[in-house]
Amino acid sequence: MRKLFSGITFVALCVSVPALAQAQRRAASMSGGAKHEFGVDVGVGYAKFSGASGGIVIGTPLDVRVGLVKAGKKMMWEPRFTLGLSSVGGGTVYDFEPGVNALFANSPGGHRNGMYYTGGAGLVFVDNGPNSGTGFAFNGGIGWRKPYGSGAWRYELGVKYTTKMTNIQPSELEIGGRIGISLWH
């Protein structure tokens, strides 16, 4: 377990370092030029496990995303890496979720300003103490970006379904939101 979290932390730091380094450079023009969006989010939601009581889940600040933008395109690919800690149904669960989402800009501001739709899938690696396992997650939502300086605040509301993991946890439906910050390179 200790090796797992050490590895997850190392990967999250490796993904975060380019965003921190870019914060030291002059910002790219808001009219274009930037091809990558680096962001960190925190989330909160209501989770309901199949056959168990539901409860509140708070996402840790280790939710890192990297947007891959193509100039003039309405669609953007976004790899996401989430490290989660939850206490629902009487036990503590740690999970690491690498995944990828597609974002569709729905405003004249493209991917820097305004509303967007998102949907994606990923793997879920879970450790609930005595057991560990892997499942799949599917998500969808709607979000907004509000520019500030060379970055943007990002707000997202959505739903996520995680498949059942034998001897680990039942399937899960989560409804919630996330708020974060985005930097452009």
Image: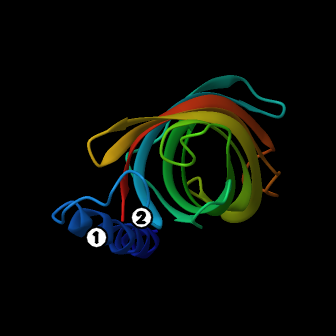
Image side of residue 104 versus residue 147, left or right: right
Image side of residue 175 versus residue 32, left or right: right
> Who's the residue at 18% across and 66% down the image?
25
Q: Examine the rendered structure and indicate whether residue 77 appears above or below residue 52.
A: below
How many residues crowd mark 2 within 10 Å: few (<14), some (14–19), many (20+)? some
- Residue 3: give x, y in percent of width and height: 41, 76
One can see residue 88 in this view: no
**Res 117 label:** none
Task: Determine which residue is flagged by label 1.
Answer: 17
> Who's the residue at 38% across and 37% down the image?
147
One can see residue 1 in this view: yes
- Residue 19: give x, y in percent of width and height: 31, 64
Tell me the quarter of the picture where residue 29 sits: bottom left
Q: Amino acid at mark 2?
A: Ala
Of residues 88 and 180, the one nearer the viewer is 180
Of residues 149 and 31, the one nearer the viewer is 31
- Residue 42: give x, y in percent of width and height: 43, 39
Of residues 68 and 172, the one nearer the viewer is 68
Q: Quadrant of the C terminus?
A: bottom left
Using the numbered discs, state the Cα–Cα distance from disc 2 to disc 1 in whole angstroms: 17 Å
Q: Secondary structure at mark 1?
A: helix
Q: Amino acid at mark 1?
A: Val
- Residue 94: give x, y in percent of width and height: 52, 52
Q: Secondary structure at mark 2?
A: loop
> Who's the residue at 19% across and 62% down the image?
26
Tell me the quarter of the picture where residue 114 sits: top right
* Nearest to N terminus: mark 2 or mark 1: 1
Of residues 91 and 70, the one nearer the viewer is 70
> Who's the residue at 39% across and 70% down the image?
15
- Of circles 2 and 1, the one toward us is 2
Task: Determine which residue is flagged by label 2.
Answer: 34
Image side of residue 175 versus residue 33, left or right: right
